[in-house]
Amino acid sequence: MKQLLKYIGGLLLAICSLSACKKSNPLSFSAVDMVYIYKAPWILNTDSIVYSFAIRPDSLMQDTIKIPVRIIGMAASKDRAVTIRVIADSTTATAGTDYKLLPCNIPAGAYSAIQPVVIYRTAGIKTKSINILLEVVASPDFQPGVPNSKGSTTVAGGTTHYRIRINDYLTKPDNWDTWLTYFFGTYSAVKFKFIINATGLSVIPSDLPYGIYSVYSTLCKQQLEIYEAAHGPLIDENGDPVSFD
């Protein structure tokens, strides 16, 4: 019995000593909060964007690119600043003339936000594309996170860099000669602009139901007849009248 009591007493002393040790030497862990540009899983090429004013109404003189950002860490009880800078030696656009980078904050209780970039329609981009390269940098609230994680159709990705390309001229769609020509005829920039205005589409993919292309073609023919009745033939950049026959 005495031996048992000694054993129990020693065990209690060890437990008390361990408890005292824990109280006098507490351990703590503090993770660094990070922020990155979010790549949605269903849109894989979200580390860059090509924005063309040419497919927008002629009256639109400025627009806002909205870049999604997310944090790594816990939400906070206050707003926190995200710092994104323009990499000057990789940017051909001029601040204040071609674009304006607005502030970005993660709101209190939130895990994501939008980095807005205002872009302007200037005369120079009618003949030459310009670009802006952005980079997430350290701020008092965040460190840059996820330098370059490629997403997939099911998994999101992230990056710390984002490129914006801006122009105001139309380029021939990649699927014109292989598909769209059968419904709209020979390509011209003036014709493509007319199609955009008539259908409301700036991109016409090749995987729509066949009948949809016939509907678009018929719609364009009807709109061209209305135009010609009011203004005469629509002449393209090559000096040829636009036709959908």
Image (spheres, rainbow, N blue to C red):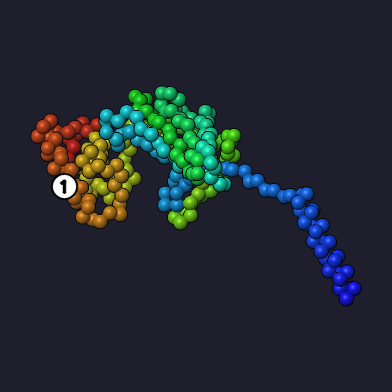
Q: Is residue 190 left or right of residue 150?
A: left
State the residue lying farthest toward the bottom. Answer: 1
Residue sitting nearer the eye, 3 or 232: 3
Q: Is residue 28 left or right of residue 175?
A: right
In this rendering, the answer to whether 18 lies above or below 104 is below
State the residue lying farthest toward the left. Answer: 229
Q: Quadrant of residue 18?
A: bottom right
Q: Quadrant of the C terminus?
A: top left
Residue sitting nearer the eye, 209 or 96: 96
Dot 1, how many residues are within 10 Å of its Cα: few (below 14), some (14-19), or many (20+)?
some
Q: Quadrant of the N terminus?
A: bottom right
Q: Is residue 190 left or right of residue 10?
A: left
Residue sitting nearer the eye, 138 or 199: 138
Q: Under tag 1, what secondary structure?
A: helix
Q: Residue at x 31, y 44 (%)?
A: 203
Residue 136 point in image, percent of width and height: 54, 37
Q: Which three-letter amino acid code belongs to the residue tagged 1?
A: Thr
State the residue lying farthest toward the right. Answer: 2
Looking at the image, how many numbered discs can be counted on the residues?
1
Can residue 28 be seen in this snapshot?
Answer: yes
In this rendering, the answer to whether 139 lies above or below 181 is above
Q: Quadrant of residue 17?
A: bottom right
Can residue 186 be seen in this snapshot?
Answer: no
Q: Residue at x 86, y 71 (%)?
A: 5
Residue sitting nearer the eye, 92 or 118: 118
Residue 55 point in image, percent of width and height: 30, 37
Residue 152 point in image, percent of width and height: 47, 54
Residue 238 point in image, percent of width and height: 24, 32
Read off the residue under disc 1. 218
Q: Residue at x 17, y 45 (%)?
A: 219
In this rendering, the answer to whether 229 lies above or below 70 is above
Q: Residue at x 79, y 53 (%)?
A: 21
